[in-house]
Image: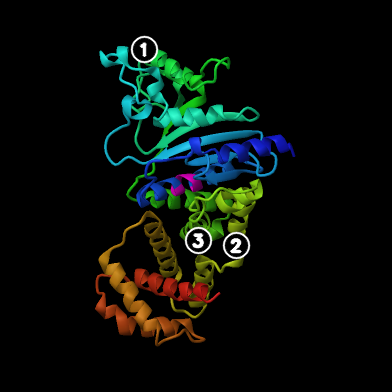
Amino acid sequence: MDRSVIEEVFHVANRKDLAESGGGHNQKGIDFQRAWALARMFELENEGANDFLFLFETIQDIAELDSSISPSSIHIYQVKKKDRGEWAWKELTGLFEPTTKKSATQAASDIKLSTLGKLYSSVLAFKKLKISGRFISNAGCNLPLNDGANAATSLPCDLSRLESGYLDLLTKGLETLHEAGTLPSNPSLIHVEKVPIHPDSPFTHLRGLVLSFLTERSPRHAGQASALVDALLVKIGPLGAKTDSCSTFEELKKERGFTRNEFIAALGVLEHVPDQEGIIELWLSQLSSEGGADFMEIASIRLEVSKIFKRQLMGGEDPQVVALVADCDQWLGNNTPGLVLKCFIEKAKADLAGLHPSIRSAEFIAHLLLRVAQKCVDQT
């Protein structure tokens, strides 16, 4: 371990002049940040990362190191949601556009307190690590590029690609953030990126991403995607909430950091939690052996179970389904499965199916079995 690198990270993390100021984020903004951070962790896991460390509300919004023990690179992120429109040049840089008269008389140093100015200042604070600053948002950045395109509609790009007039202004502004006698400014160290996360429902995208991840990595746990997201949010939710300075790097990691080892541990918990779909598959086999459903009926029930999981992950629910689930839960408070599953299902249908005439038999059975399976999971 290179202690000088760790000491540099710790030193920069404790610099008050580089900390976020001015009111912080509302809950929607915090949720957006957390959803993006977890999505980024799953992206790194898919890429085969051996280690990582995320620091929250420490060096700008989020800092991502390639190792929790001996880092060699760091990405610093400003992660901002926007409810309407795109990000404008003035919003990002504090500078007037080069096409305006005010631009000619404005001080280049006005960039200092802007979003990109603060991000670049944090980048400059590191001397020992490979470094980049990245502005992440659900909204595009309306910045003209040198090839005639626009950053709002392009793939992620660094700001060295700006149209010449904007690049000249940005370069002069960034130069004012450098100490005298240091290297010239480098706009390529700052990237902008639009991400498909809606600020009103940031976890919808995340649940879909985690479903895809588990479907490929561990198909039998795909039904637990939503539970995994919730568990990870509980883990990272408190990080960065404390504003007191940390006295050591280890304390910094504990109070504001999340490592790949912790991420993998959360995945490992899935192995110890009963899988709802696995439980239902056992019951469907039993139901088939009892003569309670033929091959086509079993296939229909299995299809309905998959549809239910998909609706849960994507968010939203049919009011009729909500009523059915509530009735199933109430009924299960007084009825438990016996040795013969067929009889249990027939009794449930006799008591409840008439209250929900629009719900087909396979869908009714799927909801009933899922509620029973959920009770089994909750008891573990």
Q: Judge left or right: residue 66 versus residue 318.
A: right
Q: Nearer the viewer, residue 17 or 66?
A: 17
Q: Write the residue at 60% across / 62% down.
A: 269
In magenta stretch: residue 83: no
Q: Which segment is the magenta one?
A: 34-38
Mark 3 and mark 1: Cα distance apart in space: 51 Å
Query: Is residue 371 visible in this depiction of the protein?
Result: yes
Lower position in the chain sequence, tag 2 or tag 1: 1
Q: Position of residue 333 (x, y in %)?
A: 40, 84
In the rendered image, the vertical position of residue 73 relative to residue 30, given as above or below: above
Q: Amino acid at mark 3?
A: Gln
The residue indicated by pointer 2 is: 269
Which numbered tag is attached to residue 224? 3
Q: Are marks 2 and 1 in contact (CB under 8 Å)?
A: no
Q: Which secondary structure lies at badge 1?
A: helix
Marks 3 and 1: which is nearer the front? 1
Q: Position of residue 3 (x, y in %)?
A: 72, 38
Q: Which residue is denoted by mark 1 in the rendering? A: 165
User: What residue do we see at 37% from left, 85% from top?
Assistant: 347
Q: Position of residue 116 (x, y in %)?
A: 42, 29
Q: Nearer the viewer, mark 2 or mark 1?
A: 1
Residue 170 x %, y %: 41, 18
Count every numbered label the image shows and give the total.
3
Label placed on residue 249: none
Q: Main secondary structure of the magenta part?
A: helix
N-term-proximal mark, 2 vs 3 = 3
Q: Residues within 10 Å of mark 2 (few under 14, many from 20)?
A: few
Real-space Cα separation, disc 2 to disc 1, in angstroms:
53 Å
